[in-house]
Image (cartoon, rainbow, N blue to C red):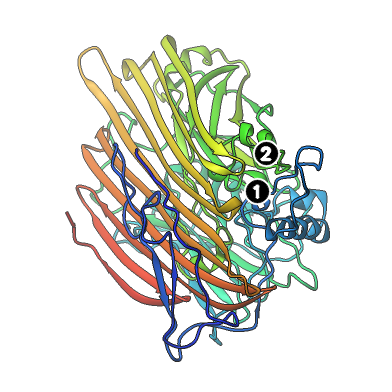
Amino acid sequence: MAVRAGGGKDVGVAEGGGLDDGEELVVGEGGEEAAGAVGGELGGGGEEVGLLAVAVVVVPGGLWKEGLEFVRMGKRYEKLQRERSATEQHHTPPMTSVLRLLLLLSLSLLHHSPSTTANNYIHKKTHFRPELISDLSTKTHPTTFFEVTKPIQLPKTKPCSYLLLQHDFGFTYGSPPVLANYTPPSNCPSQNFAKIVLQWEATCKGTQFDRIFGVWLGGVELLRSCTAEPTASGIVWTVKKDITRYYSLLMNNQTLAVFLGNLVNNMYTGVYHAKITVHFYPAEVNSGNSVSGYGSSADLILPISQNIPSNDGLWFRIGNSADTTSKKFMIPQNAYRAVVEVYVSFHENDEFWYTNLPNNFITANNLSTPRGNGAFREVVVALDGMEIGAVWPFTVIYTGGINPLLWRPITGIGSFDLPSYDVEVTPFLGTILDGKTHEFAFRVTNALNVWLIDANLHVWLDKKSVKTEGQLLKHSVLPAVVTLVSNFTGINGNFLTTVNKSVSSVGWVKSSHGKIATNATQRFDFSNFMVLGKDGDLQIVNQIINFNDSVDARSSSSSLFSTKSSKRFPLYLYSEDVDNGNGTLSEVTNLTLGYNELGVKDGGSGFSVSSLKNLQNGHSVMLRKGNSIVAGRWSTQQAYQYGDSKFCYFRNVSSSNSAILHDEEGKTCRK
C-alpha cells in the first residue's frame, strides 16, 4: 500500500485561545494527502488513500463547553521525548511541551497507582489513555451505552430465565472472583433448548475508569468484556451473548465466577451494579439436529484457565515475549473432534500495541518509553510444546481508549463482547488419545506487560465407542516473517512493518463415524505503516490484518464438514497535538476501525454463507488550556451490515457530542 503523510501549516486558534460563534477551526495537513482515510474504508492493494482536513464550526448555542477539567497523563509515547545528554549535543534543548507531558505522566503514575496487584489490570492512563475526562454532557438522566451488533436469532418459544448473580463491584482489586453456585434449569417445560443467551446488565454513576471483566462457568470463560465509563448522571448498558455452544457445560452443576477489578476511593467513586441472567429457549417442535455431530456443540468443554480460587480473575498473565503460560489437561479416549477457543485481551504497555515504536528507533533516539517492540503481536498456541496455531487479534479499543468521548454512547467494536478465536485441534487428536495428561501453552510474540489469556477446549465424544484412534499425518508451520523498513531522522520519520505466516495440519481419527481426515489451515498477513512527525506531535497509523482459516473433514468417499473464514481488520489512526502559541493546545483525533468477515460452512446443519461488514469512524477536536478543556467537539459514525442465507441485518448510527443524531436499522439484505 502506498501511503503518504502531508506536511501543512499548523492549526490556528483565535486570539485568547477561544473560538467565537461562527469561527472555523481547520485541522489537517494543509489539504495535502496523509496516510489513511476518514469517513471511508481503508485502501489496500497498492491503492492510495487521502486524509482530508477536518473542519469544526462553532455555532451559536453549540456544544462547545468551557472550564471543564481534563487531566491527561501523557499522550503519544510520552510524546516521544528524546533524552539525549548534553555530551551528545552542543546544547541542552529547552523544556518543551513533550517534556512537560512526560513529567506529568511519571508523577501521575506514581500518584495514582493503587497497588502492584491493581496495576496488573487497570488500564494505565498513558499514551492514548487520557486521565478521567469530566462529564461534558448536560444530561440529568442516565445514558444508555451500547455496542452495535446483530440481534440474536431466537426461536418462537417462551424462555426460562434465571438470575445467576446480582452484585455491586466496589473495591475489588486483589480479591478473588465473586462466586455463585449454578444448577441447570429444572422447572422448564422442555429440556431441549435451541438457544441459550447470557445477559449482563449494569449501571454506574460517578467517576470511574473502564474495567476489564470476565465471566466463567466451571472455569470455562463465557464472556470477556469492558465496562463503560460512567458519567455524573449515570450510565446503563446491557450485553447479550449467544452461549449455546456451551450447551453441555450448562447442563451440569457448576461454579459461576465473575471478576471485575475495580477501585473505589475519594477520587474514583463509581461502583458497578451488575446482574447476570441466563435465558433458555426451548426448541420448536420440528427443529432438526445436525448430522454426525460436526455442526453441533461439543459434548465436553474443559477449562484451560487458572483454578479457583485465584485472585484477580482466572485468566493467565503474560508480561513479556519470554513468558509462557500453560495448563495441563486430559481428554476422554473416545474423542473424535477438538477445538481450542482462545480469549485474549491486551492492557497497560500493550493496550495500543499497534502504535508501539520499533526498538531501533527507540535506541537511536535514547528514548525511555516502555512501549516498544514494534507494532506487531501474535498469540502462539502450543500443544505439548508444538505450535499448532496462532491468533492475530482484532484491535479492540476499550471505552476509555484513544479518546473516551468517542465511545459515548456508541462503544468500540468488540469492547462489550471481546471476540474469541478457534484453533482446530482435531488433526492432533492421535497424539493425545492415550489417556495421559497433556499441556496447552500460550505466548505472545513481542509482548509487553500485560496480556490476559485463557482458553476453552471443546471436545466431541463418540457415544458409540469407548476408544477412538488417530494419527497426525502432516504438520507445517511457516513462521512469521517480519520485515521492517525504517526511514527516520531524529524523532520524525515513517516505518513499514509487514508480516505473513501460515500453519497447516492434517490428521485422521477413526470412530463410529468412520475414518475421517481433517485438514486445518491458517494464513495471516499484516501491514502497519506508521508516520511520526512534528517532533512527536503527530502520529499516523494505517494497519491491515488479514486472518484466514479453514477446516475440511472428509471420509474416503465424501466431505462431511467444511468451514472457511476470511477476516479483515482495518485500522486507521491520526493523532496530532498543535501548540497554538497562546497557552492552548489543540488535540485532534481521526479514527477508522473495521471488522469484516466472510464465512462459508458446508455439512452438519447444511450449507451457509455469511458476511459481516462493520466499520466505525470517529473524529474529535479538543482545545485545552492548562488542565482544562476550553472547547471540544467529537462525533462517531458506524455502519453495520450482516447477511447469511436465512437472516439479514443492518444498522447505521451516528452520534455527536454524546447525542444520537441518526439511528436506522432493519432486517433487509443490502448489496
Mark 1 neighbour density, 10 Å: few (under 14) some (14–19) many (20 or more): many
Which corner quadrant holds the N terminus?
A: top left
Which corner quadrant holds the C terminus?
A: bottom left
Alpha carbons under labels 2 and 1: distance apart:
9 Å
User: Is residue 35 visible to us here?
Assistant: yes
Q: In the image, is 113 to the left or to the right of 208?
A: right
Q: Which residue is mark 2?
A: 365
Which residue appears at 40% of the width and 61% of the height?
A: 30
Compared with 621, 334 (above or below) is above
Q: Are marks 2 and 1 in contact (CB under 8 Å)?
A: yes
Q: Secondary structure at mark 1?
A: helix
Which sits in the foreground, 513 or 538?
A: 538
Q: Position of residue 537 (x, y in %)?
A: 58, 56
Q: Position of residue 412 (x, y in %)?
A: 47, 58
What is the number of callouts on the image? Answer: 2
Q: In the image, is 581 to the left or to the right of 641?
A: right
User: Is residue 299 visible to us here?
Assistant: no
Q: In the image, is 375 to the left or to the right of 118?
A: left
Which sits in the foreground, 127 or 51?
A: 51
